[in-house]
Amino acid sequence: MALFTDKIAVVTGGSRGIGKGIALELGKQGATVIVNYQKSMDAAVAVVEEITATGGKALAVQADVSVEEDANRLIKTAVDTYGKLDILINNAGTTRDNVIMLMGAEDFDAVIQTNLRSTWLCSKAAVRTMMRKRYGRIVNITSISGIMGNAGQTNYSASKAGIIGLTKSLAREVASRGITVNAVAPGFVLTDLTSSLPEDMLKKLNENIPLGRWGTIEDVAAATSFLASDAAAYITGHILTVDGGLAM
C-alpha cells in the first residue's frame, strides 16, 4: 500500500521547484494533493495533470498564503472538498537578496511575509481541523541559511531561522493532539533558478559540500515525504538537513 493512501495534503507554493517535487512525490505515494499557487496557474495545472495522469488525485488552488484570508480559504477549500486535512507542507517562499546596506525595508518585509508569515498563517488554519481529528503532519521547508546564515540574505536567513523556531514551538503546542511538526532544511539544490548560475560558481560552491554534489529536488521531496508519513510518527520538532553535510 502507498504511504499516503486516503491522505489529503496541501502543498503551498506547489507549482514549481521544490514544491512541485514534493507535490509529485506525495501524489505518487497515494495522497490527494492540493497544489497551491499564487500567480503560476498554468504551472500548477500542469502539476495537477501530471499527478492525475498516473491515477492520482489533485486540485490546483490559488491563494497568496501570506494573506490571512487567502491562507484560511486554502485550508477551508481542502476540508470542504475532501472532508479533512492530514498533511500540510509549508513550502511557499521567495528571495530578495542584497547586502544589508543596499537592502530596502520593503525587500526585508516581503521575504518575511512570504516565507515566515505564510507558514504561521497556514499552520494556524490547519491546526484547527487537525486538532479535531487528533491527527496531522506539518512539514515546513526552511533552509541551511536559517542555520548557518548567508551573506546577502539577512532577510531570507531571518525568515528561515524564524521557521525553525516556529516549528519547534508549534511541535510542543500540538503534540498531545497527535500532530507532528517538523522541518526540512535543504542546502544547495539544483532547480530552474540555480541551474542558470555560471559553471565556475557552481563548482566553487560544490567544493564546500562534503558529499561532493548539489542536492536534487528529489532528495528534498523524499525527506519531506518521510516526515509527512506515519513512519515518522515518533519524530516531532526536528529539523532535518538535506545538504550533503554542508551545515554539520
Image (tube, helix red, strand yellow):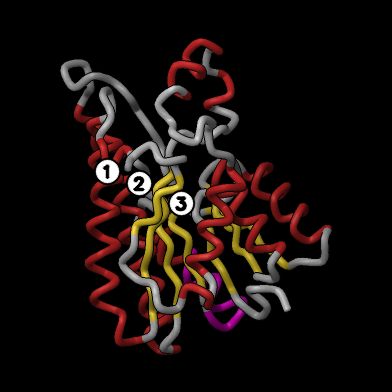
Give the residue type that dot 2 points to. Answer: Asn
The stretch drawn in magenta includes residue 82: yes
Residues at circles 3 and 1 in contact by the CB criterion of under 8 Å: no
Whether residue 150 is visible here, answered yes or no, is: yes
Q: Residue at x 44, y 31 (%)?
A: 209
Asked whether 42 falls inside the magenta stretch, the response is no
Say what amino acid the circle numbered 1 marks.
Ile
The residue to which callout 3 is attached is 91
Residue occupying the point 39% across, 85% down: 178
Mark 3 or 1 closer to N-term? 3
Residues shaded magenta: 74-84
Q: Are marks 1 and 2 in contact (CB under 8 Å)?
A: no
* Residue 54 as seen in the image, left or right of residue 146: right
Residue 170 image position (x, y, % from top left): 27, 69
Q: Where does label 2 land, which residue?
A: 115
158 left or right, relative to 244:
left
Label located before the other in sequence (2 or 3) = 3
According to the picture, the residue beneath numbered tag 1 turns out to be 147
